[in-house]
């Protein structure tokens, strides 16, 4: 494995284990077994390395969101919503990173080319059920799901006694389909 790939892999591991706040160039270099200056040969800024790490998470999320064949469009949308929430729960550090556009904008890696198709997946599924205002409905659905994901990962839903997300997911999807 090349050194840039090893640096990205080490970053992914650190992100998953320790969270975004502890994801420094020095920590990644230490994990990789190279000098603290070595990452800069391949990633000119810390944010460039973060963008490369985020790209791996976006690829994983995109694979999870692929619609299941044979299911109704609404069921595909419910499944995509469930996959989105599962990704957030299983990979909270990565979930935090891939939506930190304030850090990743202009950092390289052309993340928009990877992230915009994820949103288009939701738009396309919404359009198959309710073609009117599909993009606006998808934005509203995504913001609702994102909020639900954050509430879940911060254990706020447990305080409300809500642990079974399936009924909530279906309700959220139906609410945005009109």
Image (cartoon, rainbow, N blue to C red):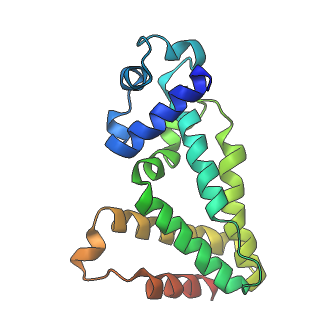
Q: Position of residue 77 (x, y in %)?
A: 64, 78
- Closer-to-camera residue (68/161): 68
Where is 168 relative to 15, above or below? below
Residue at the outermost front position: 1
Q: Is residue 140 visible?
A: no
Tell me if residue 46 comes above or below residue 146 in the rendering.
Answer: above
Say whether residue 115 is left or right of residue 81. right
Q: Is residue 100 visible?
A: yes
Residue 53 coordinates in the image, percent (x, y): 54, 37
Q: Is residue 66 above or below residue 174?
A: above
Total labels: the figure holds 0
**Where on the picture, by quarter, is residue 91?**
bottom left
Q: Position of residue 160 (x, y in %)?
A: 25, 80
Q: Quadrant of residue 168?
A: bottom left
The correct choice, above or below, for 49 with respect to 86 in the image is above
Which image quadrant: the C terminus?
bottom right
Name which residue lies at 42% across and 18% down. 33
Q: Which residue appears at 43% of the width and 49% of the height?
A: 96
Residue at image location 54% in from the left, 66% down from the top: 84
Asked whether, in this view, residue 138 is left or right of residue 48, the answer is right
Residue 55, horizontal then vertical, whole percent: 61, 41
């Amino acid at each position: 494995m090349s050194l840039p790939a090893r640096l990205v892999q080490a970053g992914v591991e650190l992100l998953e284990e320790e969270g975004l706040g502890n994801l420094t160039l020095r920590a990644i270099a230490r994990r990789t077994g190279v000098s603290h200056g070595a990452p800069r040969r391949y990633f000119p800024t810390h944010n460039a390395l973060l963008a490369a790490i985020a790209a791996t998470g976006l690829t994983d999320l995109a694979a999870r969101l692929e619609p299941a064949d044979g299911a109704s469009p609404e069921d595909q949308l419910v499944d995509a919503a469930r996959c989105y929430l599962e990704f957030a729960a299983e990979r909270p550090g990565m979930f935090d990173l891939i939506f930190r556009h304030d850090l990743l904008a202009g950092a390289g890696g052309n993340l928009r080319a990877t992230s915009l198709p994820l949103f288009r997946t939701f738009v396309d599924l919404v359009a198959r059920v309710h073609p009117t205002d599909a993009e606006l409905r998808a934005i509203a659905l995504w913001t609702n799901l994102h909020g639900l994901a954050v509430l879940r990962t911060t254990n706020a839903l447990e305080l409300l006694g809500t642990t079974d997300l399936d009924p909530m997911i279906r309700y959220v999807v139906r609410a945005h389909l009109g």
